[in-house]
Image (cartoon, rainbow, N blue to C red):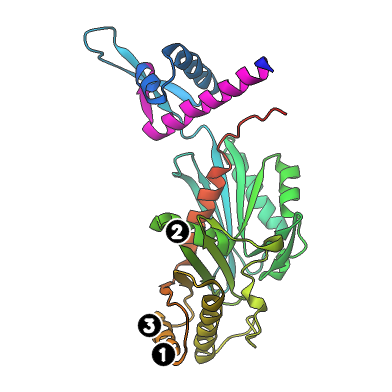
Amino acid sequence: MKIANAYLMKEININHVRQVMKRVETATKPQLASLTKLSVVTVNSLVKELCDLGELFEDQTVPSNGGRPALTYRYNYDFSLALVMYINEKQGQDLITATVINLEDNMVFREEYTMPTFDQKHFYEIIGNVLALHDSIKVIGIGIPGQTVNGEITVSSHRQLEGIRMTEDLEAQFGLPVIMENDVNAAISGYCAKQELDEDLCVIGMYFPTKYPPGMGIYLNGKVIKGKLGMAGEVKYLPMGVDWYSPVEEEVFIETVCRMIQTVNAILAPDQVVIYQKLVDQDAVIQAWEKYQAKLSMPSDPGLVLIDSFQEDFEAGMRWLTLKALEPALVQFN
């Protein structure tokens, strides 16, 4: 037990040094000891280990008040990379975006691939090609327009995705952990993180693609609410009488959006509702919602935000989620 406790303490300390170095980027050993509240002896040992791993490297010497010059150490943000894949749509075609980011969330690679419809074999080939170019990739994050249940994509606006056991396939093929998230859940997480909103707010995100059914994400108390089997937010099942796979007239679309906001407001009373769409003029939606509200009695008035670029928040959310998966987990002893 003493050995186990000592090992756990070492893991805690090295992760503490790692997090401090990520934040400050460069530091001498005395500075690091001061910042971490660890002894210089402990810091010496941990810095050596992180240097041996390649996570830290020696940088430059700096004057130290008349004594021997001190050596600074720099954090290697490229020590671990993450591959983040997004499945979205662009001008009626599926758009696959492959992005490689480092631990500072800086982009080191980005490529876009268009497909008339989703092609599983081609998608896996893209991942394999990117991994071959960047051998420091340690995790794969994938944002999909759908939900996974027990490893299988069971619900998706992209029918070609249904039935695929993508996480299992990719982990077996490439030997890396795979993080999968619903696109709207990722987008509303990215929006809230970028806006630095208070965690106690309830924020709803609704995404209306061009040729697929809509989806919704619910952000509350600093996290996404997923519901049973991750199916919260599957608003395409609301009885709106709309065929989302066929072109929808502008008037019908706007009326349907207003009814969906009303439904969500009555159940969740959100602080904000974020609408991602570029099917109609944004001002037309705002004006229609104001008229809609005037005719009804509702318990609260959510702030309405319209955004025409879904991709930006989708990417921000997926990058944040995937980088979180690279945070070292503490070893647990039973």
Q: Which residues are magenta?
A: 3-29
Comparing 266 with 140, the one in front is 266
- For the residue carrying disc 2, how many other residues have a C-alpha within 10 Å: few (<14), some (14-19), or many (20+)? many
Residue where numbered disc 1 is placed: 294
Looking at the image, which residue sits at the far left?
A: 66
- State left or right for residue 79 relative to residue 228: left
Residue where numbered disc 3 is placed: 283
Secondary element at image label 1: helix
Q: Position of residue 120 (x, y in %)?
A: 71, 59
* Callout in the foreground (2, 1): 1
Residue 7 in the image: above or below residue 265: above
**Mark 1 residue type:** Ala
**Mark 3 residue type:** Asp
Secondary element at image label 2: helix
- For the residue carrying disc 3, how many other residues have a C-alpha within 10 Å: few (<14), some (14-19), or many (20+)? few
- State left or right for residue 166 relative to residue 317: right
